[in-house]
Amino acid sequence: MLVNRGRRRRQVATASGLAVGASAFLLTLMDYSTRLGRTANSLGFASNFFDLQGRALLNGDLAVPRGSLGIEGFVERGHEYMYFGPFPALLRMPLLSTTIEYDGRLTVLSMAIGFGVFAVMTTRLTWLVRDSLRPDDQEETTRFEAVAMAVFLALATGGTTLTFVAALPWVYHEVYVWAVALGVGSMYWLARVLQAPSAPTITWLAVFNLALVLTRTTGGFAMCLVAMAAGAWLWTGRLHPRAPYSRLRAVATAAAGLVPLLVAVGVNWAKFRNPYLFPLEDQVFSGLNPHRTVALAANGGTITGPVYFPSTFMAYFRLDGMRIVGHFPWLTLPATPARAYDGAVLDQTYRTGSVPAFMPYLLLMTIVALPVLFRRGLDRRVRALRAPLIGGVLVTGGVMGYGYIAMRYTAEFVPALVVGGAVGHVALVRWLERRGNAVRTAALFAAGATTVFSITAGMLTGYTAIATTTRGPSLDHYLLLQERLSGGEQAALTTVSSADPAPGDGSVDDLWITGDCDKLWLNTGDLYAPWILVERRALLATVEVEPDHLIGRFKLFQSRSEAKDSVWIEFNSSDQARIYVRNQRGDYPGQWFDILDPRRVRVGVRDVPEYGYAEVSSSPGSFVGYIRSDKHDENFTPEPVDIKNVSHNELRLAHRGYRVTYEPGIRPPVCSRLLDSVQGRA
């Protein structure tokens, strides 16, 4: 009876914890919608890289089509390669071999499956830790312990920065979901091998190590090296002195690390002629971004090394690595990008939250785990947990010595925090069970509160990342929700001016309205694009045409981008007109249409900032095409450009039988609402 009751409590605790954690991750991943095919940005950039790699592999090649990776491509020996490992592409190949229907729309599904693996392996690892630390009462699970374990599983699966990573379904974040899932899986099977090596456990260790090293090279190398060290440990017989396992199993354990390592070296060599590095000087982005050249030159041709450790340590472990503000979303990233220390020249740096701020309980429990695991006289089952924790710490070496600081890299710490947090939490629960009800209740409440805090922080910062990266309707909804939930505070952040903001104006979260909603800007606090354009008021030209007009054409609008895009109207001898757009590649005309009474043609230009293009249409007529509404600055960062009305000599134009008037379109809806809110509170 006790066995069945204990098993049921475990099952309920597991289901409850995973339900909470999975809800946080999947709601963020889906952007609170049902769009399984959504991408991180409106153009879908970097959400199709693994599809491209999968199709290349189906053709027996590691190289992808030239130019398909944009700035992320590496050009080697006339071929283009991606630096990401091929494992997520391998998972796509069965589907890619049957249809092209879902190309570019598989990232959400892949990340969801990766989370499923993470949830399963985290659950198994957590209960393995529990049974290793409490071998005498494996079949008995008290009500208090079940609740405490449910809280931990909710925290471990939904309260890490992996929930923030779920916000953006593109290659950069997909890699981390899989790397964390596979890393935790490798740790679990490593612990199982060290506790009782067998053919199945060693095989699973090799499978997870191989998948990990073909997903995230640095993390895979770390776990493969630890597996090889574990094989050597088994060889000595010190872990199991009374029941030494055969040296064949020790060799097999070492091979579970060595063979995947050699496979990864072979793949990297085939692409870059290097066992583990990739030549940054050959990346397309390096040829477009002058600062990348400066960073490489300052660090001997690389952006990795111990010189970056002070900068990354201060970014990822600062105690004030989160802002609490009075307006929605209330919990957000630090106001400014992470800075460099000790003269290091960072390649790129972004606003980055820290481990203590976003995952305080897991970090605290990992610290508690150190004396639990590394004191003398421990049972072999407990000593077997040392290697997974060491491996998790080594996994973080990839970002601690990397001159690129971003929030997504904090996911690198999750595997170590999961295993360390489980050890510390189980030890704490065991200690609390010998204390009074008041102490237990207070401790459980504190653990639950920090779990809610971490889950909420990940979801809110993820929601903000979706809005500012995807933009378009997502950003519109974000700002309108902010207005509803914190209108007064939002109004205090808003500036109305006749001029556009300069890069140094304002601070993070500020809103800037240019003119009568001519433009609406949001300050992201980013170093490279501090102001992003949310909305721009449309432009409208009305062309009145006399019955005896002369045949000809003239320009109506001009984009100030480098492409010098423009919009023209043209007339023929059949009393018809058409609109066409012109850029450096040529002219792209719309259809001819009759000039109808009252002999007036309206031409509109409506910017869609998230795409970097403005739509051109006419009435009569219809949609014509697009003109550029942004350009890249000297650091290859997109920035909006003005679209202007073209001035005409009215007398000369009237002589030809035309009259042109310009007026602004209706005020954009989001800006209009925010401006009315500001003016209503003035």
Image (cartoon, rainbow, N blue to C red):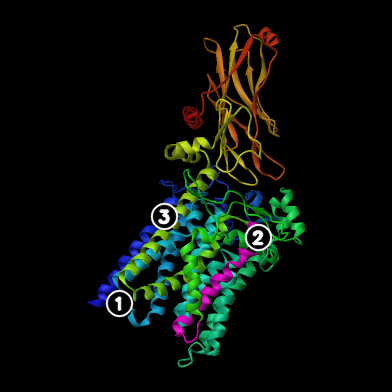
**Residue denoted by label 2:** 311
| Along the viewing direction, whichever of 55 and 431 lies nearer the viewer | 431
Query: Horizontally, is 74 left or right of 522 in the view?
Result: right
The numbered mark at residue 140 is 1
Residue lying farthest to the bottom in this orientation: 242
Marks 3 and 2 sit apart, C-alpha to C-alpha, by: 31 Å
Task: Give residue 403's position: percent from left, percent from top.
Answer: 67, 59
**Under tag 3, what secondary structure?**
helix
In the rendered image, the vertical position of residue 630 relative to residue 306, given as above or below: above
Examine the structure image and report whether residue 402 is included in the region drawn in magenta.
yes
- Sequence-earlier tag: 3 or 2: 3
**Under tag 1, what secondary structure?**
loop
Residue 39 showing in the rendered view: no
**Under tag 2, what secondary structure?**
helix
The residue under label 3 is which amino acid type? Ala
Task: Give residue 419's position: percent from left, percent from top.
Answer: 47, 71
Residue at image coords 55%, 74%:
390
Task: Tell whether label 2 touches label 3 (CB within 8 Å).
Answer: no
Write down the region rendered in magenta: 375-404
Task: Give residue 405's position: percent from left, percent from top.
Answer: 62, 56
Residue at image coords 48%, 44%:
326
- Sequence-earlier tag: 2 or 1: 1
